[in-house]
């Protein structure tokens, strides 16, 4: 088992002092460090719980991403974003029976809130022969408990460290196929306990546990199109002294200083309009375009025929629309839809020479929800999209050299491999909007049924009476003749 811990000192943080770090053969002590943090665990198959081993053995590949609902500050090289919730990607196969252990695995590791029934019933198909699953999972306490029980095996320091996963800004679980290890990585923009500096002790938890630690900061670019970092590195249990380092790499994802926020124009009703206000600034390069990637839970949907109208798109502040992939039935109520929902991409119009925020309006539609006692409006949540500039790159074949490269987010199939992404940041305390959806009140359902039946009966009697009167009138006319 291999663990890599990276502390990234923020540009506006107080200067670091050598007294803040103490490396020994047993542990690393960190005191008062203002930094972001990433942890990356590489776990071989035989170190995993039996259930996980059996599930992975049947899979050609598996990628799980989770992002918090809370807004957080990103920075390079940890700038990649995904909509809040749990995302799962796996390659398409001829028979979904071969990969149907995915849903039981998700249910065991993340709890019943994961909501996955089977690949055929819950996943959607997206281009590049992939299955995709999404759910608005916000509480990952079941996942933390699973790690503590089956990975930590009672090790006190492991139990303490794993608690922080529940407060991560995002984490990934990646498996590249048979013979490959499982890679788990998590990111915290600040100390997960009190948003203050890090004061912690890192140790080896197991005999074969290798712990590499880096304390880095971003430096001025040495090469164009590369990010440069420098700092100190150490390995717990191998040395008591840090080694200085500086390195550069080509990033697939970069931070952009633009910001955005979303809201519903009308807070109730079945045809809401979702508005985005975007301060995008200038594009990183001339050939870049601005995009918004959405994952809509099945409560919501877009009308692809409506958004095929180019004139309408332009009036909404858009240049293009890709998708939707997944549920697109315009009439079906929510209880008839087994799959999770749909994903799609909007290309946002970016007028030249304007400093005003871009305003985008997206017409959405809601499916009928199941009747509920009390009726009125039931609140439903919709995650904000992730917004980024997509730019062509001439050095894309070197992206893999980044030690922090992040792939399989969910939207790469809509772009070429030569794309670099510059991510804007959501502005506000949370990254979702809430809408009240009207539902049938079960307490008055019988009255409504009786009233509806009565109206139908009255209408029927009225039509019959009109027909009889019309026939009778014709009879009298015939006798007179």
Image (spheres, grey):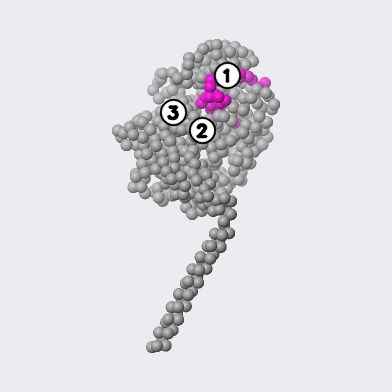
For the residues labelled 1 and 2, the Cα–Cα distance comes to: 23 Å
- Residue 128 is tagged as none
Residue corresponding to mark 3: 254
Residue in the image at 65% along x and 33% along y: 146
Q: Find residue 153 and report its horizontal and vertical position in percent.
A: 69, 27
Q: Find residue 89 and report its horizontal and vertical position in percent.
A: 54, 39
Which image quarter: residue 60?
A: top right
Image quadrant holding the N terminus, namely top right
Residue in the image at 50% along x and 72% along y: 461
**How many residues crowd around disc 2 within 10 Å: few (fewer than 14), some, or many (20 or more)?**
some
- What kind of element bears circle 1? strand
Residue corresponding to mark 1: 199
- What kind of element bears circle 3? strand
Of 9 and 418, nearer the camera is 9
Residue in the image at 42% along x and 43% along y: 265
Is residue 88 visible in the rendered image? The answer is no
* Number of marks drawn: 3
Disc nearest the viewer among 3 and 1: 1
In primary-sequence order, the first of circles 3 and 1 is 1
The range drawn in magenta is 182-207
Of 255 and 61, nearer the camera is 255
- Residue 70 is tagged as 2
Image quadrant holding the C terminus, namely bottom left
Of 150 and 356, nearer the camera is 356
């Amino acid at each position: 088992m291999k663990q890599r811990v990276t502390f990234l000192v923020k540009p506006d943080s107080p200067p670091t002092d050598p007294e803040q770090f103490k490396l020994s053969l047993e542990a690393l002590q960190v005191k008062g460090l203002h930094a972001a943090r990433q942890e990356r665990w590489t776990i071989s198959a035989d170190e995993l719980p039996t259930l996980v081993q059996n599930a992975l053995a049947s899979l050609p590949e598996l990628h799980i991403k989770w992002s918090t609902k809370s807004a957080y500050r990103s920075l390079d090289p940890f700038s990649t974003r995904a909509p809040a919730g749990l995302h799962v990607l796996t390659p398409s196969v001829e028979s979904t029976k071969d990969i149907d252990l995915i849903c039981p695995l998700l249910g065991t590791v993340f709890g019943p809130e994961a909501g996955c029934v089977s690949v055929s019933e819950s996943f959607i198909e997206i281009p590049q022969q992939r299955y995709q699953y999404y759910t608005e999972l916000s509480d990952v306490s079941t996942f933390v408990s699973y790690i503590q029980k089956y990975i930590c095996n009672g090790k006190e320091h492991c139990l303490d460290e794993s608690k922080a996963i529940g407060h991560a800004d995002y984490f990934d679980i990646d498996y590249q196929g048979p013979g490959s290890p499982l890679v788990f990585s998590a990111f915290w923009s600040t100390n997960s306990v009190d948003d203050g500096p890090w004061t912690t002790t890192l140790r080896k938890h197991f005999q074969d546990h290798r712990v590499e630690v880096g304390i880095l900061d971003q430096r001025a670019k040495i090469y164009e199109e590369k990010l440069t970092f420098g700092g100190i590195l150490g390995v717990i249990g191998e040395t008591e002294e840090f080694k200085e380092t500086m390195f550069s790499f080509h990033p697939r994802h970069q931070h952009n200083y633009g910001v955005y926020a979303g809201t519903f124009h009308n807070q109730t009703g079945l045809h809401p309009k979702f508005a985005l206000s975007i301060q995008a600034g200038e594009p990183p390069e001339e050939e870049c375009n601005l995009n918004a990637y959405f994952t809509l839970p099945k409560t919501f949907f877009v009308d692809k025929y409506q958004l095929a109208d180019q004139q309408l798109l332009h009036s909404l502040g858009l240049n293009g629309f890709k998708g939707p992939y997944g549920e697109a039935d315009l009439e079906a109520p929510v209880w008839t839809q087994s799959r999770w929902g749909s994903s799609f991409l909007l290309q946002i119009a970016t007028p030249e020479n304007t400093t005003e925020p871009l305003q985008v309006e997206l017409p959405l539609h809601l499916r009928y929800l199941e009747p509920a006692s009390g009726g009125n409006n039931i609140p439903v949540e919709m995650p904000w999209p992730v917004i980024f500039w997509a730019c062509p790159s001439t050095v894309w074949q070197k992206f893999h050299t980044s030690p922090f490269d992040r792939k399989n987010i969910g939207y790469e199939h809509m772009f070429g491999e030569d794309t670099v992404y510059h991510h804007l940041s959501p502005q506000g305390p949370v990254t979702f909007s809430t809408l009240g959806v009207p539902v049938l009140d079960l307490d008055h359902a019988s009255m409504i049924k009786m009233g509806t039946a009565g109206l139908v009966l009255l209408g029927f009697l009225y039509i019959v009476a009109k027909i009889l009167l019309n026939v009778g009138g014709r009879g009298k006319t015939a006798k007179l003749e």
